Image (cartoon, rainbow, N blue to C red):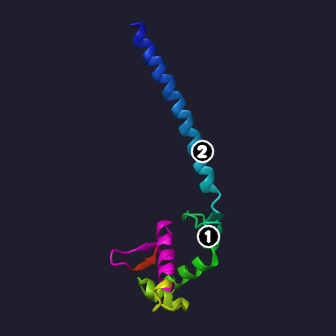
Amino acid sequence: MDRAADEVRAERDELAVAERVLERVSEQLANERASAAPMPGQVGGRSVMMIPHREPDLEETMLPPDYQRILAAVRQAAGPVMARHVGEMLGVDVNVRAKLEPLRGRLVRLVDRGWLRKLPDGRFTTRL
C-alpha cells in the first residue's frame, strides 16, 4: 500500500512540474504574439523581415511595404486572382519565372499568416 501511495505522489509531483512548464511556455507564446511588430531575423547571414500573423487588432501597416502593396493589389482586383495577375498589377515581369516565383512565395506567406486566402484553384483573395 505504501509503495502505491509513493508512486501516486511521484506522479502527482511530475504532473505539477509539467503544468508549471506548460504555463511558462504558454505565457511566453502569448508575449511573443503580443509583440506583433515584424522583427528582422537572420537567414544565411542576411537580414530578413518576418511577417506577423494576422490578429484582430493588428494593422496592415505592420507589414513590410512590399507585402502592403501585394495586399492592396489583391484587394483592388475584381475577384480572386492568380499570382501572375498580381504580378502584372505590381509591374513584375511575369514572363520570367525567377521574378514570378518570389511573388508567389510572398502570396503564400500572406496566406499562411492569415492575411490572404488561397482558393483550391490556386487563386488568391482577401480574407472575409
Q: Earlier in the sequence, mark 2 or mark 1?
A: 2
Report if residue 25 is visible in the image: yes
Q: Which residue is more in the foreground, 23 or 6?
A: 6
Say whether residue 118 is magenta: yes
Residue type, numbered disc 1? Glu
- In the rendered image of this protein, does residue 44 appear above or below residue 21? below
Residue type, numbered disc 2? Glu
> SS at mark 1?
loop
Seen at 52% across and 33% down, the residue is 19
- What is the magenta range? 99-122
* Residue 112, position as x, y percentages in the image: 47, 66
> SS at mark 2?
helix
Res 32 → quadrant:
bottom right
Taking the image as shown, residue 124 lies to the left or right of residue 50, namely left
User: Dot 1: within a 10 Å radius of its alpha carbon, few (fewer than 14), some, or many (20 or more) residues?
Assistant: few
* Residue 2, position as x, y percentages in the image: 42, 7
Res 82 → quadrant:
bottom left
Report if residue 77 is visible in the image: no
Taking the image as shown, residue 108 lies to the left or right of residue 68, namely left
How many numbered badges does the structure rendering display?
A: 2
> Disc 2 or disc 1, which is closer to the eye?
2
Q: Quadrant of the C terminus?
A: bottom left
Say whether residue 12 is magenta: no
Seen at 60% across and 73% down, the residue is 60
* Residue 53, position as x, y percentages in the image: 55, 63
Taking the image as shown, residue 54 lies to the left or right of residue 82, namely right
According to the picture, the residue beneath numbered tag 2 turns out to be 27
Seen at 49% across and 82% down, the residue is 74
According to the picture, the residue beneath numbered tag 1 turns out to be 59
Proximity of marks 2 and 1: CB atoms separated by less than 8 Å = no
Q: Quadrant of the N terminus?
A: top left
